[in-house]
Each structure stands twice: as C-alpha cells, then as structure tokens.
Image (cartoon, grey):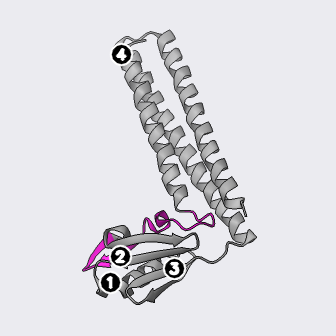
C-alpha cells in the first residue's frame, strides 16, 4: 500500500476516534441520576462582560450524589451564576445559599429517563453522521490518488479498509450509547 493511502487511513482513524470522544463528552452532560460537575459543562457565566465557562469562576463539587455545589471565587458572582444556570435550562433550579450556589437534583422520573435516552440516541446519531462524513471526505481524497498513479486495486483495497474502520467506529458509538442508556435506565 502506498504512503498516501496509509496516511489517509490513519487520518480517518484519528478523526473518527475524535468523533467518538466528542460523543462521550456530550453524553457526560446527560444526567443519569447521579450528580457530576460535568453536568454544568457548557454553562457560560457573564464574567465582567465576557462569557466564561462556569468551571473557570469557582469550585464545583458534589458533596453527595443528589447535590452540586458551586463556590465562586468572588461572592458577587453568586446571582450571576444562579441566572446562568437557569438560562442554560438544564432541568434543575439552583439556590443561592450563603456563599455557595447549591443545586439539589430532583429524582429522575421514568418519563424523564426515556427523554434522556432519546437525547443520548440523537447524540449517537450525530456522532455516526460525523463518522460517515469523515469516510466520504477520505474516500474523495483516495479517489484523487488515482491521478498520482496509484493502481485501481490499491484504491479498492484502501476503500475497503476505510469502510472497515468506519464500521468499527460506528459500532463504538453504538456501544457508548448503549452503556449510557443502561446507566440512565438504572433505578
């Protein structure tokens, strides 16, 4: 196999692996009954006119599985953090308590669990679409190698290997979402 096709297949593996990692990161935001600081990732707080990730303006901890506590480094940020969490529409209400913002997670209903599973599957489908788009782009690059004198047989072999890599990462997406679904539906 030529150096060009090897590089393209390696590029495909790296970018598809990145798509699976992104899916993993997105699924961490879904609440499966246990409080985690990552549930607040993506929440931006107006820090003196600059949208800043909430984890950059204070300590986020989970003293118990049903509670998240945010202790800002500046006390005047408490109402701003409260407002940012409400605006993020994460399905829970923060409460300013002395010098911390406390979030008590409500119990997850069966209906909410099904909704979370649906969202997880949507995220997985987005991941698979990204993987298929990567395959298409790499396939286009492989076809352009024909102009560089790469044989027809080698191009077919590279396309077959690319499809195998694609199938592997699509299965990985399915496995990740199946694990998350199991976690969400566990009572």
Mark closest to the chain's N terminus, 3 or 4: 4
Q: Give me the C-alpha separation between circle 4 and circle 2.
A: 48 Å
Mark 1 / mark 3, whichever is N-terminal: 1
103 inside magenta stretch? no
Q: Position of residue 137 (x, y in %)?
A: 45, 34
Mark 3 or mark 4, which is nearer to you? 3
In percent of width and height, residue 78 lies at 36, 85
Residue at which label 4 appears: 3
- Stretch in magenta: 30-52
Answer few, some or many: residues within 10 Å of disc 1's Cα (few below 14, many 20 plus, some between 14 and 19).
many
Q: Earlier in the sequence, mark 1 or mark 4?
A: 4
Magenta stretch encompasses residue 36: yes
Query: Which residue is at 58% across, 32% downward?
Result: 168
Select label 3 or label 2 by which is in front: 3
Nearest to N terminus: mark 4 or mark 2:
4
How many numbered badges does the structure rendering display? 4
What residue does disc 1 label?
77
Which residue lies under the disc numbered 3?
103
Please name the residue shown 51% across and 10% down the image. Answer: 153
Give residue 131's position: percent from left, percent from top: 52, 40
Residue at the front extreme, as displayed: 63
Q: Nearer the viewer, residue 23 or 104?
A: 104
Tag 1 near tag 3, CB within 8 Å: no
Question: Few, some or many C-alpha atoms within 10 Å of disc 4 (few <14, some 14-19, many ≥20)?
Answer: few
Q: In this figure, which residue is indicated by the disc labeled 2? A: 45
The quadrant holding residue 52 is bottom left
Which residue occupies the foreground of this view, 187 or 63?
Answer: 63
Question: Mark 3 falls on what kind of element?
Answer: strand
Q: Is residue 78 left or right of residue 116?
A: left
- Tell me if mark 2 has few (under 14), some (14-19) or many (20+) residues whose alpha carbon lies within 10 angstroms of its own: many
Helix, strand or loop under label 4: helix
């Amino acid at each position: 196999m030529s150096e060009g096709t090897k590089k393209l297949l390696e590029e495909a593996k790296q970018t598809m692996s990145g798509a699976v990692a992104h899916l993993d990161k997105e699924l961490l935001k879904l609440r499966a009954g246990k409080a985690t600081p990552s549930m607040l990732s993506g929440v931006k707080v107006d820090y003196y006119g600059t949208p800043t990730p909430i984890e950059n303006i204070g300590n986020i901890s989970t003293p118990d599985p049903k509670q998240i506590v945010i202790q800002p480094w500046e006390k005047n940020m408490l109402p701003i953090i409260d407002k940012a969490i409400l605006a993020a529409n994460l399905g829970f209400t923060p409460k300013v308590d002395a010098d911390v913002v406390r979030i008590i997670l409500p119990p997850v209903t069966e209906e909410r669990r099904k909704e979370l599973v649906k969202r997880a599957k949507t995220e997985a489908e987005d991941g698979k679409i990204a993987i298929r788009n990567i395959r298409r782009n790499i396939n286009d690059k492989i076809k352009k190698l024909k102009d560089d004198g790469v044989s027809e047989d080698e191009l077919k072999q590279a396309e077959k290997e690319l499809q195998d890599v694609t199938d592997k990462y699509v299965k990985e997406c399915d496995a990740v979402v199946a694990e998350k679904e199991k976690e969400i539906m566990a009572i």
